[in-house]
Image: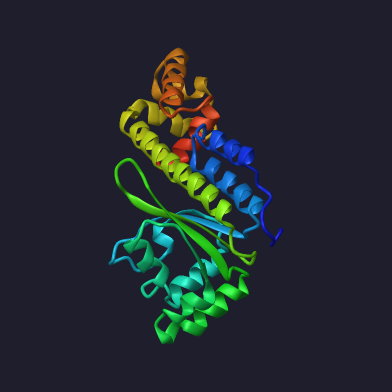
Amino acid sequence: MSTGESTVSVSSVGDFIAEINGFKTQFDVFRLMKRLTEAFGARAFMVMNLPSATSLNLSSSSIITNWPAEMLAEYDQIPLFASSPILTRLRNSTAPFQFDVESVARERDPSTVEASKTLFYRFRMPHGAYFPVHDAAGTRGAVSFSGDRPQFTLIEMMELTYVSAHIYNRLAEIRDLDTRATDTLTEREIDCLNWTAAGKTSVEIAEILGLSEHTINHYLNRATKKLDTVNRTQAVAKALRLGLIK
């Protein structure tokens, strides 16, 4: 992965935005965020909700991230979350900003300074930037990009600010779509998805539920449409992700 400045063009940023607006799942956003992170020469990203003052760890505030699991677990275990100067800044400002681990460490509780520096250097993420965002409901969050490349240029900061707003907004829209789908699926539709997930055909489900094959297909087609998917396989996958079926 490159550790120099990115060569992302304005047209490339426009392409990223066009993709984001068509996404249907968090995983779609996750894959694009990985590409975006690499394109800008960074190593890791995180999209998070702004945690409350009583939150105890970073993991529970993260929506999507490719931070190494070991790093995230250690960050919460030390713990570094409660005394984070970055979180303080996010709570008090809506302006994007860059950081480096040395300057952040100087603002930390002395007991966590060395642990913080060691952790971020070990995973080669001593620099980066945070972009405060919010959704239509007013929920605040942030998008971050970290790595060991030089500081972002002013143009890159402007581009990432724009992209970050679209990313957070789309994730909120996807969450709302998922919530509406959860609220509108009927018990029969969920039953049919459950049996489909278990590997049963429409004919077999019809026998199990004492209904006609035509009725089963009707339920599955309706569930597929409500979940905003293109076929029953995708519908089952999304229902599993939403916890509608097990």
> Residue 135: which quarter of the image?
top left
Nearer to us in this view, 240 or 161: 161
Nearer to us in this view, 230 or 44: 44
Q: Is residue 135 above or below residue 147?
A: above
Nearer to us in this view, 7 or 72: 7
Query: Residue 232: percent from the left, percent from the top?
Result: 52, 26
Query: Residue 227: percent from the left, percent from the top?
Result: 43, 29
Asked if residue 87 lies left or right of residue 200, the reply is left
> Residue 177: which quarter of the image?
top left
Screen quadrant of the C terminus: top left
Screen quadrant of the N terminus: bottom right
Identify which residue is drawn at 55% across, 40% down.
28
Q: Is residue 44 above or below residue 80?
A: above
Identify which residue is drawn at 57% across, 63% down.
68
Colouring mode (rainbow / by chain / secondary structure / one colour): rainbow
**Count of numbered badges drawn on the protein:** 0
